[in-house]
Amino acid sequence: MDPIHQFQIKNLFPIARVGGVEIAFTNSTVFMLLSLAIILLFVVGGTSRRALVPGRLQSMAEVSYEFVSDTLRSTAGPEGMKFFPLVFSIFMFILVLNVIGIIPYTFSVTSHIIITVAFALLVFFTVIIYGFWKNGLRFLKLFVPSGIPIYILPLVSFIEVMSFLSRPVSHSVRLFANMLAGHITLKVFGGFVTMLGALGFLGWLGALVPLGFTVALTALELLVAFLQAYVFAILTCIYLNDAIHPGH
Amino acid sequence: MDPQAAKMIGAGIACIGMGGAGVGVGTIFGHYLAAAVRNPSAAQGQFANLIFGFAVTEALGIFSLLIALLLLFAL
């Protein structure tokens, strides 16, 4: 009943060995490919007919498009729309991975920090590279807020730089730790059910309480799964806004 | 002291930090709700700010949870 056991990565079959590092097809790969297939079916299937009066699938695809584009436009402005493919892919991928992870006996890919760090660093370097490419050295105005007295400016700039550098850490750890903690909580409450159930008839009655909690927590996890995908996407938009419009 | 016991105590102490995040998240949603009741027409426009403030505050609590998890399972 180890609550951490569910996050184990299993090698299904090896693919290659590169310099002592094994590259294998793991259960994580399976669920990433599965979510990719779901997103492809959803988006391609939703937009293939392009009816004037949308059907169910098409209106769902349209709603998801509108949702992400509204978020991006309101936080990063109309110029931010050139990053729409990035934000939409990140949002949909994380959302589907999170939601798949709630289903029992599946594997939740986003509860591994290596995945979330990869996303966060992708956004981080996109912001830095695009910021310098678009604004040149004016991008550094991000660290020099206007209207600050000159004698505390070094301190404020230092804090701004530190908070900029800690962004990928908090961006990735938030998603990873939320998923990890939620799944551990579910597993612990599931453990209570089996422990009480082993006690006999009275135990069965008592096990109904943690069972109810597990159902309620699963509903909460569904909310968290959506909210964390949204939070990841909106933070991506806000960070991209810094690259597009530096200076406070 | 037994190192295993010290680890467990440390994990428990690290979780206290989540209380601060709880206060912060409660303040954010409480103030948002208070403002939204006063002026419901402006509430929708501030939803992104609400989620942003929630995310930034929650991250600090998550850091202390992470320390607890590291102490329990990784170190």
Image (spheres, coloured by chain):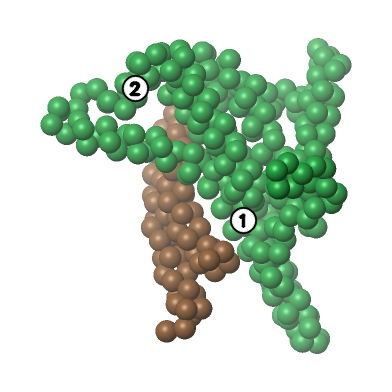
- Which chain is drawn using brown? B
Residue A26: image x %, image y %?
79, 48
- Subunit ID for the residue under disc 1: A
Dot 2 corresponds to which residue?
Answer: A140
Residue A206 vs residue A171: left or right?
A: right
Determine whether the residue tagged by mark 1 lies in a helix, strand or loop. helix
Q: Which mark is residue B23?
A: none
- Whichever of labels 1 and 2 marks the residue nearer the N terminus, that label is 2
For the residue marked with disc 2, what is the amino acid? Answer: Leu
Q: Quadrant of residue A197?
A: bottom right
Image spot of residue B19 (x, y percent): 41, 61
> Where's the N terminus of chain A, which quadrant?
bottom right
Residue at 35% of width from left, 16% of height from top?
A137
Identify residue for label 1: A180
Q: What residue is shown at x 41% (from left), y 13% (from top)?
A: A135
Give the chain coloured green.
A
Residue lying at 67% horizontally and 49% vertically, measured from the top left: A222
Q: In this orientation, which residue lies closer to the viewer: A63 or A90?
A: A90
Q: Residue at x 42, y 24 (%)?
A: A242
Q: Is residue A25 visible?
A: no
Q: Read off the chain for label 2.
A: A
Question: Farthest residue toward the front?
Answer: A19
Task: State left or right for residue A154 relative to residue B37.
Answer: left
Q: How far from the left and from the top, in percent, is residue B67?
A: 47, 61
Q: Residues within 10 Å of mark 1 (few under 14, many from 20)?
A: many
Quadrant assignment, res A215: bottom right
